[in-house]
Image (cartoon, rainbow, N blue to C red):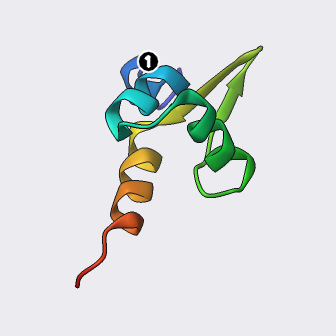
Amino acid sequence: MNNHQKSDYQTVAEVACDLNVSEKHVRRLIKGGKLACYRFGNALRIRREDKEKYEKSCHYVK
């Protein structure tokens, strides 16, 4: 049995919506190695944990 439940993964569209960016931008982040993804057949999926890790890396203090 897989350690990750289906809800642990999000689509590119869901991540784009959560981050308030375009799907194209999410794909660029993936291609640039800034956001990890997993391929299931033709579908790309991003673990929520990886998305949250990326979000934290984007925060800065003035």
Q: Which quadrant would residue 14 be assigned to in this image?
A: top left
43 is higher (above) or lower (below) than 33 = above
Q: Residue at x 45, y 25 (%)?
A: 10
Residue 9 x, y percent position in the rendering: 46, 27
Task: Tell which residue pokes out farthest to the left in this image.
Answer: 62
Query: Can the viewer see residue 11 in this picture?
Result: no
Drawn side of residue 52 relative to residue 50, left or right = left
Drawn side of residue 37 relative to residue 53, left or right = right
Q: Assign a secondary structure to mark 1.
A: helix
Q: Residues within 10 Å of mark 1 (few under 14, many from 20)?
A: few
| Nearer to the camera, 57 or 37 | 57
Drawn side of residue 3 relative to residue 43, left or right = left
Residue 45 x, y percent position in the rendering: 58, 27
Please give the count of numbered marks on the rendered protein.
1
Q: Which quadrant would residue 53 be assigned to in this image?
A: bottom left
The residue to which callout 1 is attached is 6
5 is higher (above) or lower (below) than 26 = above
42 is higher (above) or lower (below) than 19 = above
Drawn side of residue 12 relative to residue 4, left or right = right
Q: Residue at x 56, y 28 (%)?
A: 23
Q: Which quadrant would residue 32 be assigned to in this image?
A: bottom right
18 is higher (above) or lower (below) than 34 = above
Query: Can the viewer see residue 60 in this picture?
Result: yes
Residue 31 x, y percent position in the rendering: 74, 47
Amino acid type of disc 1? Lys
Task: Tell which residue pokes out farthest to the bottom in this image.
Answer: 62
| Nearer to the camera, 1 or 6 | 6
**Which quarter of the image is occupied by the C terminus?**
bottom left
| Nearer to the camera, 36 or 7 | 36
